[in-house]
Image (tube, grey):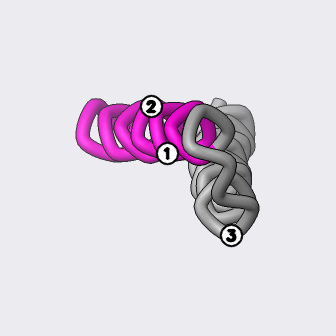
């Protein structure tokens, strides 16, 4: 996985986790859902890069 894409995936996951936690703490369902969506986007980016690395070899 390229370093740049890996960093983007981790950043999206961390941002989503923070947003989800904040949403839960303040009782904001929309923020919680947005946080989960950002985490999923980061997970998808990470999975895509892993597949690309696997196909390269």
- The majority secondary structure of the magenta stretch comes to helix
Whether residue 56 is visible here, answered yes or no, is no
Q: Residue 43: x percent and y percent? A: 68, 43
In this view, the mark in front (2 or 3): 3
Query: In this figure, which residue is indicated by the disc labeled 2?
Result: 14
Q: For the residues marked 1 and 2, what is the alpha-carbon distance in whole angstroms?
A: 9 Å
Furthest-left residue in this view: 4
- Give the mark nearer the N terminus: 1 vs 2: 2
**Residue 1: x percent and y percent?**
47, 32
- Choose between 47 and 42: the one closer to the eye: 42
For the C terminus, give its image quadrant.
Answer: top right
Relative placement, left or right, of 54 versus 46 is right
Q: Residue 47 carries which label?
A: none
Circle 3 is placed at which residue position? 30
How many neighbours does mark 2 have within 10 angstroms: few (below 14), some (14-19), or many (20 or more)?
Answer: some
> Which residue is the site of mark 1?
19
Spatial separation of the CA atoms under disc 2 and disc 3: 18 Å
| Residue in the image at 56% along x and 43% along y | 26
Give the residues in magenta. 1-23
């Amino acid at each position: 996985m390229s370093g740049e894409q890996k960093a983007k995936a981790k950043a999206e996951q961390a941002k989503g986790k923070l947003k989800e936690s904040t949403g839960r703490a303040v009782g904001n369902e929309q923020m919680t859902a947005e946080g989960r969506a950002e985490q999923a986007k980061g997970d998808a980016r990470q999975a895509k890069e892993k597949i690309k690395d696997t196909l390269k070899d």
